[in-house]
Image (cartoon, rainbow, N blue to C red):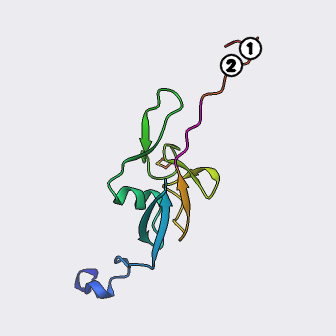
Amino acid sequence: MSAYLRSAAEDPIRRRDGEPVAISVDGERLTGVQGQSIAGIILATGRLDWRVTSAGSRPRGVFCGIGVCFDCLVTVNDEPDVRACLRRAVHGDVVVQQHDPLPTPVEGSIDG
Ligand code: FES
């Protein structure tokens, strides 16, 4: 049987809605479906950024979407530096944005 003759219900890679999950993002309750990444749930609300850079406080959200750039870092359940694009949302996750200030130069170092 050709793949073109399959009905949508028989398509093995069709979209399957999972169980709903609810997470808290900066105090706001957001809902998604089981298997969806934290970034996916946030992006679905129309929000494009959720942290700022240490230098210049520039907004960041998803850039690569595959876990390479670390632009999407968030704190999840008190665990910092979680890549929102890779982490699947779990019902009840508490997500907060993080801002890491630049380290202060040590006196006597090359920079200080
Ligand atoms: S968007 Fe690049 S690591 Fe998450």
Considering the numbered disc 1 on the image, is that residue within a helix, a strand or a loop? loop
- Position of the C terminus, as image quadrant, is top right
x and y percentages locating residue 73 in the rendered image: 53, 47
Instruction: Please say if 13 is above or below 87.
Output: below
Give the residue type that dot 2 points to: Pro
What main secondary structure does the magenta stretch of the protein show? loop
Q: Quadrant of the N terminus?
A: bottom left
Q: From this viewpoint, which residue is outermost toward the left?
A: 5
Identify the residue under disc 2. Answer: 105
* Label 1 CA crowd tier, 10 Å (few <14, some 14–19, many 20+): few
89 magenta-colored: no
Asked if the residues shown at circle 2 and circle 1 are in contact, with their CB atoms under 8 angstroms apart, the answer is yes
Q: Is residue 100 magenta?
A: yes
Q: Nearer the viewer, residue 98 or 18?
A: 98
Residue at 45% across, 79% down:
19
| Whether residue 85 is situated above or below residue 10 in the rendered picture | above
Helix, strand or loop at disc 2?
loop
Q: Quadrant of residue 110?
A: top right
The three-letter code of the residue at mark 1 reads Ser
Q: Which circle, 2 or 1, is nearer the viewer?
A: 2
On screen, residue 75 above or below 69? below
Measured Cα–Cα span from mark 2 to mark 1: 7 Å
Q: Which mark is residue 109?
A: 1
* Coordinates of residue 11 in the picture (x, y in percent): 33, 82
Residue sitting at x 44%, y 47%: 64
Tell which of 68 and 33 is nearer to you. Answer: 33
Magenta segment: 97-101
